[in-house]
Amino acid sequence: MPRIRTIQPNFARSTSMSRVSRDARLLFIQLWTVVDDAGRTRASPAELAAQLYAADDDALLAMPAWLDALEGEGCIERYTIDEIAYLRIVNWRRHQRIDRPTASRLPPAPREPLASAREESIQMSMASASEANPREEEKISESWVLREVEGILRDARSTGEHRPALRAVELLGRSIGLWDHQQKQRLDEEELALKVVKLPPEAA
């Protein structure tokens, strides 16, 4: 569920933000609205693009580069647990002050600092149950899309929010050439032209 967050006045003058693009800065701010009160969220590019850039079809292709830039500056940390990609906002408690935080339902990052002894015991039990896999750069492929769709549908069933899930699946489909309306329209027009336009008979 999206949340209301605050932006510190010195955000625009921070060193890390001066070294990333304007698009990456906007993504960083928007990520604050979808992470939970522990600063964590799923890191599927398709889901993030659908949630944060609903009107921008090119966001899915640009999302990995924006995330790479933010991670390179130490703004976020991405990690994978049980083949599901997550991210956390680094130094989350410096960015946001949350009076009554809701407990996170997402697993913590392996190197995430602990806020209390209680959180430490929870994290240790989760770490022993699930071992994080190193993140690998993946090209958009059929198997990658299928894994992403499975995760998106699983989240939609648990949260009951189906519209962002449908948008995410649409963006994924377009990324591998499905539902390309412009291409289909061009092919239809070319086929129609071949049927309508007839060459004149050769002169005798």
Image (spheres, rainbow, N blue to C red):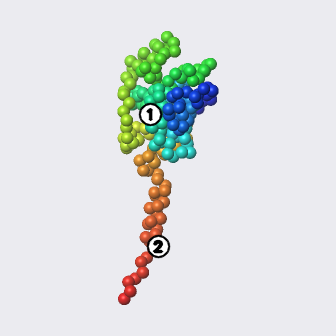
Image location (x, y in percent) of residue 33 = 58, 31
Relative to 182, does residue 190 appear above or below in the rendering? below
The residue at the point 45 percent across, 37 percent down is 65
Q: Residue furthest top?
A: 117
Camera sees residue 196: yes
Q: Earlier in the sequence, mark 1 or mark 2?
A: 1
Q: Which residue is mark 1?
A: 68
Residue 176 placement, left or right of 95? left
Q: Quadrant of residue 92?
A: top right
Q: Secondary structure at mark 1?
A: helix
- Label 1 vs label 2, nearer the camera: 1
Image location (x, y in percent) of residue 138 = 37, 37
Image location (x, y in percent) of residue 101 = 58, 20
Pointer 1: residues within 10 angstroms few (<14), some, or many (20+)? some
Query: Which label belongs to residue 196?
Result: 2
Image location (x, y in percent) of residue 57 = 51, 46
